[in-house]
Amino acid sequence: MLRPVLLAAAIAVGLAAPLASMAAAAPGTAASATRNANAATEALHRLFDDEWERGLRENPEGASFNGDKRYNDRWTDASLSAIQARQESDRQALAKLKSIDRSQLSEADQLNYDVFGWNLGKSIERQKYREYLAPVGQSGGVQTADGLVEGLSFEQVKDYRDWLARMRALPVLIEQNQALLREGAKAGITPPRVLMQRVPGQIAKQIVEDPSKSPFYKPFNRFPDSVPAAERKALQAEAKKVIAETIVPAYREFGSFFEKEYLAAARTSIAASDLPDGKAYYDFLAADFTTTNLSADAIHKIGLKEVARIRADMEKVKAEVGFKGTLAEFFTYLRSDPKFFHKTPAALLEAYQAISKRIDPELVKISKLIPRQPYGVRPIPDNVAPDTTTAYYLPGAVDGTRAGYYYVNLYKPEVRPTWEMMPLSLHEAVPGHHFQFARGLELPDAPMFRRTGYFVAYGEGWGLYAERLGYDMGLYDDPYDRMGQLSYDMWRAVRLVVDTGMHSKGWSRDKAIKFFMDNAPKTEQDVVNEIDRYIGWPGQALAYKIGQLKISELRERSRKALGPAFDLRDFNDEVLSTGSVPLQVLEKHIDTWIAAKKPVPAPKPAGKSKKR
């Protein structure tokens, strides 16, 4: 899976059986124990390998993103029968895991066992909510299937032929998605109509008169030297034919279905709690994404407290730059003064690239272990840019054949302020997501699901924490950049309030937008896109601030416990050393690390014995 499912409670990490007790046992018993341990370990890793292979086979897009090209000629089977078969396979995998004696495993494999079991358990728990009946959202779906190109490498003729095969198979995928949408409408499981009204425009971008203008044609605009010149025209001609005769008609029919049938069936409410069994569903999502047991009400209160704290810090920056108006007026100034905006997409991209180069040499101040995998900066594709967020990160391929990429939104540069670029780059690229994903791939001896795993509270918590590392790296010398960091911190605090507000407290979309605009200087374009994202992806936005608060708490705990022995670089490297795990597992790991590093007090000098 591209995004591992998260779990609601802490993982209880057990300890391996002490070696001393094994050595003290009778020889026959010790040999038997060793055989049992070896059998359990072999069974566990065989299950990991089998399930990894099943995941690649059943999710060809995920395999492609991971750099495995074996399934590059197909899409995931989205038929109801295939979905049900995958769900049954998950249940069988969990049964196999439970048949393995966890007590016979090493400490490292007990952790692997627990994380794997939590992922499977959550995957099975979420089956009852039938999320697969709403496969299309405003941020993506079959209408943006061409986006897969961003994760593919085109090096040989076969790569182009595989893409052609995928293009020819697209109508089947569209028909399967259409069937799921119809079933979802019958069951009352639909996204909010206010979001779905964006989708027809996305479908329309696939209906082109000139096939060479199709997003699916992008790979055929450029060929590497390894593709013979004699093959290129034939490949281009075939691509144009498939687009004109297969892809465009399929999208035209899908667009008609969507506008004439599905939009009217989409729900008018925005709250996840309005779905069938919706309250339980939102509780599940909140626990799932944060890997905590925090209630929606508790998360809401944490958000309000953080909003108040950050507003006070913003007032200090406002005073520092000499702005005489209110904070609301300062926000308007930050959103509208031309000096904070680049005039063209090209200038904006160049500025993002320059900031990334400025960050790179300062990384040694916050980490001793710099990932080997490189990263680059790319624009978000034009066909999805208007409806997506300011930036995102695409991890590199597992086999190292594709670097990680920091994607930035160049749509309407007049709404992309310069003061947000530093914290955004620290979060999405380095030392944020790129460090987190690339270091995960470098975990020694870890099974593949751990190396590629992604718990949102850990990953996004680290990304948000990385924004604050800019202070440690000396990158916030400009007060407006500091205002950008506070704006981004506020953005994630606001999320706690508006996400829980809309999905559990009856807030309207307009109320959520107003609360956001009142407390953060982000532009209205970004705010509306963000609020719509929270509506369409309930609970996910809660993980960022909850994760950041936990990592920051662990940093302060380490600093106090270690005193002069505390080294920020060691702490940051230790946080990344686990790979992506639930927050409680991270906390246990850091507490163990603190105990191991804590200086041992010098023995007190022996006192003189009293004479009797």
Image (cartoon, helix red, strand yellow):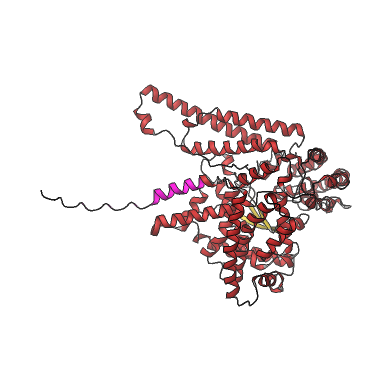
The answer to whether residue 409 of the structure is visible from this angle is: no
Indicate whether 542 appears above or below 522: above
Residue toward you, 88 or 344: 88
Quadrant in the rendering for residue 417:
bottom right
Q: Position of residue 312 (x, y in %)?
A: 57, 67
Q: Residue at position x 57%, y 71% from top?
A: 316
Residue toward you, 110 or 443: 110
Q: Position of residue 31 (x, y in %)?
A: 41, 24
Q: Position of residue 557 (x, y in %)?
A: 45, 54
Residue placed furthest toward the top: 28
Residue placed furthest toward the left: 612
Residue toward you, 220 or 119: 119
Q: What are the residue bounds of the magenta stretch?
A: 585-608
112 displayed left or right of 167: left
108 displayed left or right of 211: left
Quadrant in the rendering for residue 44:
top right
504 displayed left or right of 261: left
Indicate whether 583 appears above or below 388: above
**Quarter the N terminus occupies:** top right
Q: Residue at position x 60%, y 56% from top?
A: 303
The answer to whether residue 366 of the structure is visible from this angle is: yes
Residue 578 counted in the magenta span: no
Quadrant in the rendering for residue 265:
top right
